[in-house]
Amino acid sequence: MITTQFKVTTVGHRDLDKQSTFACASALTLTGKEIQTANVRAIDEAFTVRNEWDKRGPLAVKVKPATKQNLTAWIGTAFEELEKFVEQTAGSYVIKVPRGEFVAIPTGNVRRTKRDIIRAMQRPRNLRGKRDVVLPMRKGNGLVLFQRQRGPSPNSKYRGVKSHLTALYILVPRVKVKEVDVMFGPAVKIYRDRFGKIFEQQMAKALATAK
C-alpha cells in the first residue's frame, strides 16, 4: 500500500475541507487509472498474455475509486496465481526428462484453439508416452520433443514408411527467471510522478467551482 500525508493551506474559502477532500479523492482515482494503464502495459511487455485477461474480465487489473468518505484508491487484480505466473517463462511449460527439467516452447505444429490456446491433449505432459520421442538438437544443448504421426491416408498407421515425426516442442534447459515487478514498481513511479500534479489540477477545479 502507498500512503501519503500533505497539508493544504488556502485563504478565503470557507469550505476548504470539503473541497480539498473532494480534490484528493478525485486525484487518487485519476492516479489509480494511470497506474492501472501502467500495470497492464508492464504485464503485456513482460509476458505473453492469452485472452487479454489483464484488460477485461474477472481477472483484469481494476481500479476501485476513492471517495470522500474513504480516501483510498485500490488498484489490483483477482489473479491469485500472478506471483506463480511471473516466476515461469511466459508462453511455455516445464517438463521433466531424464536429463533434467526443461522449458517446453511450442512450435507452430502444436494445435491451438481459435483463441490461440494450446489444446489440453497437445500439452507436453499429456504427450508423454503417446508416440513421443525426445531427440537432441543438432546445434546447442537443447532437445526437441517429437510425436510420431501417421501419413495423410485415412488408412495409414503410426508405424511404417508413411509415418513421420513432427516437432512439437523445443526443450531448453530450465533457468531461474529474473523476478519482474509488473505491479508495485510501476505504481510507485506513477504515484510519485503524477499524484501531486493531478491533485493540484483537481484542487484548482474544486476551488473554481466552490459556492
Image (tube, rainbow, N blue to C red):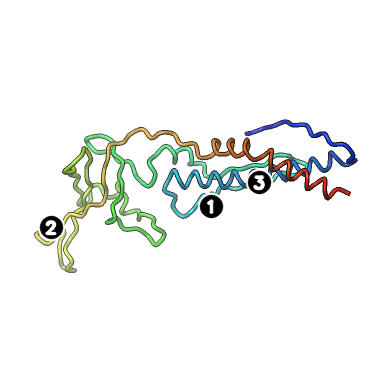
User: Going from the N terminus, do you reach mark 2 or mark 3 first?
Assistant: 3
Q: Nearer the viewer, residue 47 or 186?
A: 186
Q: Which residue is mark 1?
A: 55
**Residue at x 77% of width, y 43% of height:** 203
Quadrant of the frame with the N terminus: top right
Q: What is the spatial separation of the Cα atoms under label 2 and label 3, in whole angstroms? A: 59 Å
Question: Which residue in the rendered view is the most extreme toward the left?
Answer: 161
Q: Which residue is mark 3?
A: 64
- Residue 121 vs 197, above or below: the answer is below
Q: Is residue 165 left or right of residue 85?
A: left
User: Going from the N terminus, do you reach mark 3 or mark 1 first?
Assistant: 1
Q: Residues within 10 Å of mark 1 (few under 14, many from 20)?
A: some
Are discs 3 and 1 less than 8 Å apart at CB?
no
Q: Which residue is mark 2?
A: 159
Dot 1 falls on a residue whose secondary structure is loop
Q: Nearer the viewer, residue 196 or 101?
A: 196
- Residue type (three-letter) at the residue carrying disc 3: Lys
Dot 3 falls on a residue whose secondary structure is strand
Dot 2 falls on a residue whose secondary structure is loop
* x and y, in percent, of residue 23 in the image: 76, 43
Are discs 2 and 3 less than 8 Å apart at CB?
no
- Residue type (three-letter) at the residue carrying disc 1: Lys
